[in-house]
Amino acid sequence: MDRIKKNFGFGCMRLPRLHPDKPDVDAALGQSMVDYAYAHGVNYFDTAYTYLDGKSEWAIRESLVKRHPRSSFLLADKLPGYKMTSHEDCYRYFKEQQDRCQVDFFDVYLLHWLNGKHYEIAEKYREFEFLEELKKTGKAIKTGFSYHDSADLLDEILTRHPEVDYVQLQINYLDWESSSIQSRRCYETAVKHGKKVIVMEPVKGGALAELQALEFVLVELGLYLDTHQGDAEAFELYKQYAAMEKEAREKYEAMNGPVTQMATANAKTWAAWLSEPWPWNYQEGGMK
């Protein structure tokens, strides 16, 4: 990880889609995002077998692997260990990921979405043993797991498997003192075991950032259509992004309350605008 040029990377779970209800990636827009990140010094890119039904690995191959020297970037991928039904499955899934990404090795290779249930599967099919074999054969430079469970279980896992290099944790100011996510406690546990931490969801899954980006696209398309009213393709694209913006807005407001004062018209009382918790109002067990 000493080769990382920035203190953050490029996650490929939420690449832009051609349609809000389908996993197909908008290749042109996705490539422009990767190009921008790469040109500005970002060289750590993260994907997983299940992201966008496998389209994420395809997209990173097309936008990054095929277009830049392998030594110029770090690529992280994840094994869907919870899908394994035998130890041999680990090799089959890994080979498929290599083919999808068209790489000989991954700089970081993690067990994906480890929790109590998935940890039992990992032990049953010797997935940690598989990670060690990848390191010995040079097919993975560093290994670890992404984690979604209690700090106590994390302590148990790291005690039993001190050989892993990294733990990927959900850390942001909303979840830092959460009694369910336990960001702070998990972070402290990883540090206690001497593990480096990869942070995921630093902006809580990007819900608000995604909403702002979609609104920007709609404004730009609207300005274009003002002077190109007959462009049917642009109008169809506008309608697609309008549907995506509506979905993103409803998702965000369901979690955090009205985004604007006007949205309060859909609430029961005006108090929804004034009394809904702000991000900094959260601490363990609920509100301050």
Image (cartoon, rainbow, N blue to C red):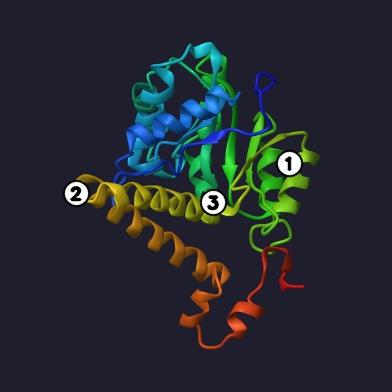
Instruction: Determine the residue positioned at 56% across, 32% down.
Output: 128
- Relative side of 134 to 197, left or right: left
Query: Dot 2: within a 10 Å radius of its alpha carbon, few (fewer than 14), some, or many (20 or more) residues?
Result: few
Q: Where is 260 relative to 75, above or below?
A: below
Q: Position of residue 135 (x, y in %)?
A: 56, 19
Residue located beneath label 3 in the image: 209
Instruction: Determine the residue positioned at 37% across, 19% down.
Output: 102
Under mark 1, the amino acid is Ala
Numbered disc total = 3
- Relative side of 70 to 96, left or right: right
Q: Nearer the viewer, residue 23 or 218?
A: 218
Residue located beneath label 2 in the image: 230
Marks 2 and 3, how far apart in space?
Answer: 31 Å
Q: Earlier in the sequence, mark 3 or mark 1?
A: 1
Under mark 3, the amino acid is Ala
Which-is-in-front pick, marks 2 and 3? Answer: 2
As drawn, the residue found furthest toward the front would be 227
CB under 8 Å between discs 1 and 2: no
- Relative side of 270 to 222, left or right: right
Q: Nearer the viewer, residue 74 or 108?
A: 74
Q: Secondary structure at mark 2?
A: loop
Where on the picture, by quarter, is residue 62? top left
Q: Secondary structure at mark 1?
A: helix
Which-is-in-front pick, marks 1 and 2? Answer: 2
Q: Position of residue 170 (x, y in %)?
A: 62, 49
Residue located beneath label 1 in the image: 190
Query: Dot 3: within a 10 Å radius of its alpha carbon, few (fewer than 14), some, or many (20 or more) residues?
Result: few
Q: Earlier in the sequence, mark 2 or mark 3?
A: 3
Q: Earlier in the sequence, mark 1 or mark 2?
A: 1
Query: Dot 1: within a 10 Å radius of its alpha carbon, few (fewer than 14), some, or many (20 or more) residues?
Result: many
